[in-house]
Image (cartoon, helix red, strand yellow):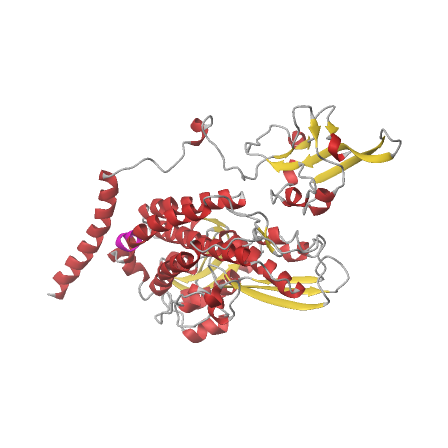
């Protein structure tokens, strides 16, 4: 008798699981998975997504980086290097300015401590996340654009 | 080298599981001495992904070393970050704003849920059931999307800074979590329906890999692993941090100590996590999200130890500071995975080789946490 009971119990336990599978088979909803390479055009990452590090430029090609190296000090991996230059300002002072903002992409862990440490809010982690390149050297990037300047209110 | 031979002089067969094996959930290597199908001895060989995080942290500042802990137990990344931040805050005697504490606690419990969901999915997959994998990841995906909106990353978030949070929570955070809770409360009984009572699953788990309370204590097991053996060790109850002292939740304790008890503890912990989040999510206070902490942190000279409860057990952070530099003099992490793995020989010796997969699934191994 207990033998039959065992069979009944085990069969019913499996059928209850299969009932759930059948339920989802009959009541299928919108697919939860994203068809990633195909939905590239519509794929939107959340606003805070930590993707590629960018030095924000406005339409006049001006950025907010004063070259203070706070991000370089905050970076745990040494992936940021700030190269400075000296520049004479209009009132005759010799001031430090940003020459090149070097970001070594391959060393970055995307912790966003640089964005957090920036006193002027010049940096942002952008939404772009497809980083595959054929040549490793191209992962060392210059973030300030050609001919860009410091925003006038920070000079 | 005799240890590399597959058959010993006395006739036992040496089987190497790993370092690349799907059932080990990472790069772990097990050397198993077999007598027929019976495991005579089992020895984990570690070090394949040792990254010397503790030594590396000695050359990082206190703000920088927090993101390292996300790379240890990546399924409890948020709770690990909290552990380090907590140690620094208690050493500096910084009062963390209430808003930051509430958000931290909510995110910690969401992390625990996500970790247990992944464990449940992987356990099903290890034991030959594929459907749990899809159901577990369906619910986990919602949590990782919430993390992505809050912290910016899905797995290795670096949202905690000493003194609070890195950024304020985004608009609509509470609504998102509430919606998830409503859905997940409906989905959690499905976990039981699908797997918990399944006859095949029971046959492979009940009475397998029994760990007694004394053994759990002597191996230093913690978390669901020890609680399944009746050892009360929940850090949230014994040494409350964040807001846990003012919250209502039960420590799940079972006494059987077998694989099924460990399974049950984790399933029931998910209900407790939902209960904790429900108490907080509609009462996130307004105010500051970060206390004022100096940009360059220097801890006073001394030794500091704090612990938090990750999804796998007790995570301890031990910092020695010389009081002069902005780096720790020595940092030591007590990771739950390492101690839990130590009990593997007690669990598996004398059992069948086929039970090993069920035992390893029930330990809930995360190899980067073991190797650090």
- Look at the picture and state if A58 lies above or below B23: above
Q: Which residues are magenta?
A: B190-194
Residue A72 position by quadrant: top right
Q: In the displayed structure, does residue A113 sit left or right of residue B282?
A: right
Between B3 and B163, the residue placed more toward the observer is B163
Residue at (52, 55) in percent of width and height: B104
- The stretch drawn in magenta includes residue A127: no
Residue drawn at x 36%, y 57% is: B354
Q: Position of residue A33 (x, y in %)?
A: 38, 37
Q: Residue furthest bottom?
A: B214
Q: Position of residue A34 (x, y in %)?
A: 41, 34
The residue at the far left in this view is A1
On the rendered image, what quadrant is the C terminus of chain B found in?
bottom right
- Tell which of B133 and B92 is nearer to you: B92
Residue B143 in the image: state x and y as whole percent.
Answer: 43, 47
Quadrant location of residue A69? top right
x and y percent of residue A116 in the render? 64, 45
- Tell me the chief SS of the magenta region: helix
Q: Is residue B146 left or right of residue A50?
A: left
Q: Is residue B370 left or right of residue A79?
A: left
Residue pushed farthest right?
A92
Quarter residue B208 falls in: bottom left
Viewer-proximal residue among B150 and B366: B150
Q: Where does the N terminus of chain B fall, quadrant-wise?
A: bottom right
The answer, for residue B358, to whether it is visible in the render is yes
Identify whether B160 is placed above or below A145: below
Question: Would you say residue B5 is visible in this rendering?
Answer: no
């Amino acid at each position: 008798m207990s033998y039959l009971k065992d069979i009944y119990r085990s069969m019913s336990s499996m059928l209850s699981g299969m009932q759930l599978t059948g339920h989802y088979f009959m009541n299928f909803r919108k697919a939860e998975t994203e068809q990633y390479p195909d939905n590239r055009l519509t794929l939107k990452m959340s606003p805070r997504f930590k993707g590629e590090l960018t030095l924000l430029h406005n339409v006049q090609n001006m950025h907010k980086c004063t070259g203070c190296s706070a991000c370089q000090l905050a970076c745990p991996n040494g992936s940021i290097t700030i190269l400075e230059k000296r520049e004479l300002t209009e009132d005759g002072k010799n001031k430090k300015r940003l020459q090149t903002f070097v970001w070594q992409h391959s060393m970055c862990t995307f912790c966003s401590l640089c964005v957090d440490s920036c006193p002027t809010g010049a940096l942002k982690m952008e939404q772009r996340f497809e980083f595959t390149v054929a040549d490793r050297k191209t992962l060392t990037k210059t973030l300030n654009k050609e001919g860009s300047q410091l925003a006038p209110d920070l000079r | 080298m005799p240890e590399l031979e597959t058959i010993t002089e006395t006739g036992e067969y040496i089987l190497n599981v790993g370092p690349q094996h799907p059932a080990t959930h990472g790069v772990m290597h097990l050397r198993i001495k077999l007598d027929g199908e019976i495991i005579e001895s089992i020895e984990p060989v570690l070090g394949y992904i040792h990254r010397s995080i503790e030594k590396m942290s000695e050359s990082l500042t206190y703000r920088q070393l927090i993101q390292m802990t996300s790379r240890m137990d990546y399924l409890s990344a948020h709770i690990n970050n909290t552990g380090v931040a907590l140690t620094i805050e208690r050493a500096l005697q910084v009062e963390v704003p209430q808003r930051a504490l509430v958000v931290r606690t909510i995110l910690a419990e969401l992390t625990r849920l996500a970790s247990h969901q992944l464990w449940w999915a992987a356990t099903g997959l290890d034991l030959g059931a594929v459907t749990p994998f899809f159901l577990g990841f369906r619910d986990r995906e919602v949590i990782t999307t919430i993390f992505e909106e809050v912290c910016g990353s899905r797995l290795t978030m670096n949202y905690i800074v000493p003194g609070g949070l890195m950024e304020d929570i985004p608009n609509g955070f509470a609504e998102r979590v509430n919606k998830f809770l409503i859905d997940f409360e409906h989905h959690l009984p499905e976990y039981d329906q699908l797997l918990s009572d399944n006859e095949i699953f029971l046959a492979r788990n009940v009475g397998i890999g029994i760990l007694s309370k004394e053994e759990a204590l002597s191996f230093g097991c913690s978390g669901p692993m020890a609680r399944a053996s009746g050892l009360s060790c929940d850090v949230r109850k014994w040494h409350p941090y964040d807001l846990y002292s003012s919250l209502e939740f039960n420590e799940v304790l079972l006494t059987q100590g077998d694989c099924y008890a460990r399974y049950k503890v984790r399933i029931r912990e998910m209900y407790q996590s939902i209960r904790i989040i429900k108490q907080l999510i509609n009462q996130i206070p307004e105010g500051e999200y970060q206390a004022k902490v100096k940009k360059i942190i220097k801890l006073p000279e001394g030794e500091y130890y704090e612990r938090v409860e990750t999804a796998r057990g007790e995570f301890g952070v031990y910092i020695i500071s010389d009081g002069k530099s902005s780096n720790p003099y020595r940092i030591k992490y007590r990771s739950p995975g390492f101690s839990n793995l130590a009990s593997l020989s007690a669990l598996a010796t004398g059992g069948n080789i086929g039970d090993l997969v069920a035992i390893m699934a029930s330990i809930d191994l995360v190899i980067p946490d073991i190797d650090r």
